[in-house]
């Protein structure tokens, strides 16, 4: 509820402009304080998702690279935070641009202040910039999990900046900017099925391909080891689950009924996805896997992301089931294509994003979009708008292909630059990224036992190491 009377915005539109002179006019007058409060809260929630990604990845990985994955997620915030200020926001959300990418009319956040944003006339540019900057930060953090166990830190930093500029910004532009080709075509993507999930999943697959397989990897069993800290996986899942209310709910870009509906379907899909994955794992080992539940929750959240502001509650059950089942089986694809993608970013986010995009084309309902009082869509198959599925497929294929190819090109060129080769040496890979790249450890005792082989099959630790390892450590 606003503490002041909302008035109609009468300033310049359609090109870069601060909007009004705050020394002469009340810059807040065209906007609701309630919308401000909701979107600023959602901004904080999405920011918390980034370390959530780090903890989730850290728990799934091996002990000797646990801290490196948390560090990479945090450095993504810093690198993209600067990139977004420098030119990222302008390339993605400038008021003018081509069908593919924006221009530099907002370079350095020039003229980004009180003008209604391209996302919603209910938010000024400055607030929309802040909120969308968190989406830009989490996307490369998702992708860079592919560096687990064998990726160098310095090239990863450079990669994040380049990738955000060349890959994320154009995809975000064509999806969410009113001038973008997918937006104009009629593609529906509420909160980032293509810009965030499909792009990061494709990038992780490409980054893994260019890094090469980890030492000891084989095409039958991969590199089998247990997630070293299931508590970290749970902690990361909690951060992500809570943060997703800001991720999807905030994408309504206002405090309204559509935002509430987005939060509701997000929660339903996450619940159903978690239990579905759990059941699939139980059928194999008769164990109720905590990691399986957490993986299913993420699959459900990813699947509902592009649909959250378009679909009715009953359909969220279908999103959760399909996300859990398809992403679960998609974890086997890396063995079929022979790419060592260690944390299943491709299966969870790439495949999950595609599933969500396609289901949006089926279940999008015009009356759900209209809950914000202004949005009008033709809907999907439930509204007999059958071409919508084709739009969703085109957007998904374009986003995946562009991200995969451009990531391969970026990695290939970086490997040619002295000092920017992506992969660590075999010696460093054996020691672990935490020791070699950071000089710090996630746990105090790891320095003594870091040479303990975490692989379940085909490895044994030296006797000297067994003597100093923790009594509970499985060697």
Image (cartoon, rainbow, N blue to C red):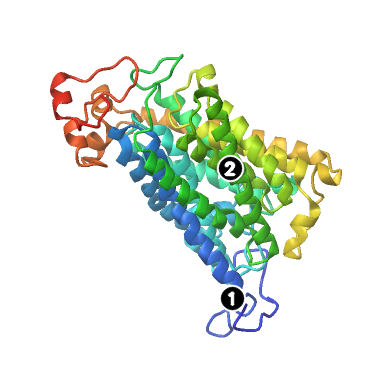
Residue 245 image position (x, y, % from top left):
56, 56
Vertical comparison of 291 with 243: above or below: above
Q: Is mark 1 on a helix, strand or loop?
A: helix
The residue that mark 1 highlights is 33
Q: On the rendered image, what quadrant is the N terminus found in? A: bottom right
Asked if residue 454 can be seen in this view, the reply is: yes
Give the alpha-carbon distance from disc 1 to disc 2, as whole Å: 30 Å
Q: Who's the residue at 46% across and 50% down the image? A: 238
Q: Looking at the image, which residue sits at the far front?
A: 286
Number of labels in the image equals 2
x, y percentage for residue 301?
58, 45
**Percent x, y of residue 368:** 76, 56
Residue 264 locus on image (x, y percent): 64, 55
Along the polypeptide, which appears first: circle 1 or circle 2?
1
Q: Taking 263 as reference, is 81 left or right?
A: left
- Camera-nearest residue between 37 and 103: 37
The local crowd at label 2, few if under 14, some if 14 to 19, many if 20 or more residues have their Cα within 10 Å, is many
Which residue shows up at 57% across the image and 67% down it? Answer: 38
Which disc number belongs to residue 7?
none
Q: In this view, does 268 lie to the left or right of 456?
A: right
> Is residue 399 among what the camera can see?
no
Q: Nearer the viewer, residue 285 or 467?
A: 285
Label 2 sits on residue:
302
| Mark in front: 1 vs 2 | 2
Say what secondary structure mark 2 lies in: helix
Of the pair 9 and 132, the residue shown nearer to us: 132
């Amino acid at each position: 509820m606003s503490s002041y009377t909302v008035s109609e915005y009468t300033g310049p539109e359609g090109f870069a402009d601060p909007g009004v002179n705050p020394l002469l006019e009340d810059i807040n007058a065209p906007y609701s304080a309630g919308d401000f409060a909701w979107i600023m809260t959602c901004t904080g929630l999405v920011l918390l998702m980034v370390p959530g990604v780090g903890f989730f990845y850290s728990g799934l990985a091996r002990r000797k690279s646990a801290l490196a994955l948390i560090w990479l997620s945090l450095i993504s915030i810093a690198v993209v935070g600067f990139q977004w200020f420098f030119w990222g926001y302008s390339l993605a959300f400038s008021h003018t641009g081509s069908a593919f990418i924006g221009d530099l009319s907002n370079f350095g956040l020039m003229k980004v202040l009180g003008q209604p944003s391209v996302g919603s006339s209910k938010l000024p540019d400055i607030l929309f910039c802040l909120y969308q900057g968190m989406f830009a930060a989490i996307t490369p953090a998702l992708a860079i999990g592919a560096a687990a166990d064998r990726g160098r830190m310095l090239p990863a930093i450079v990669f994040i900046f380049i990738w955000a500029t060349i890959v994320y910004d154009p995809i975000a532009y064509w999806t969410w900017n009113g001038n973008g080709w997918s937006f104009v075509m009629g593609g529906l993507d509420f909160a980032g099925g293509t810009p965030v999930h499909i792009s990061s999943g494709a990038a992780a697959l490409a980054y893994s391909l260019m890094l090469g397989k980890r030492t000891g990897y084989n095409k039958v069993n991969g590199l089998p080891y247990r997630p070293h800290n299931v508590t970290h996986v749970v902690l990361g899942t909690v951060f992500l689950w809570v943060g997703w209310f800001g991720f999807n709910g905030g994408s309504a870009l206002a405090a309204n009924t559509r935002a509430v509906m987005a939060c509701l379907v997000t929660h339903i899909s996450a619940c159903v996805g978690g239990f579905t994955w759990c059941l699939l794992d139980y059928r194999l080992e008769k164990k109720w896997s905590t990691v399986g539940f957490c993986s299913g929750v993420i699959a459900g959240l990813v699947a509902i992301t592009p649909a959250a502001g378009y679909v009715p509650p009953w359909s969220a059950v279908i999103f959760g089931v399909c996300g859990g089942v398809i992403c679960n089986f998609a974890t086997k694809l890396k063995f079929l294509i022979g790419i060592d993608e260690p944390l299943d970013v491709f299966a969870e986010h790439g495949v999950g994003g595609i599933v969500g995009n396609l289901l949006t084309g089926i279940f999008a309902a015009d009356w759900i979009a209209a809950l914000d009082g202004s949005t009008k869509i033709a809907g999907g198959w439930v509204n007999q708008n059958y071409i919508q599925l084709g739009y969703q497929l085109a957007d998904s294929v374009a986003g995946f292909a562009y991200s995969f190819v451009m990531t391969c090109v970026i990695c290939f060129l970086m490997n040619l630059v002295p000092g920017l080769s992506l992969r660590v040496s075999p010696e460093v890979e054996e020691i672990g990224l935490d020791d070699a790249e950071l000089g710090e450890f996630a746990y105090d005792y790891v320095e003594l036992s870091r040479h303990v082989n975490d692989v379940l099959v085909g490895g044994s630790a030296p006797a000297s190491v067994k003597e100093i390892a923790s009594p509970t450590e499985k060697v």
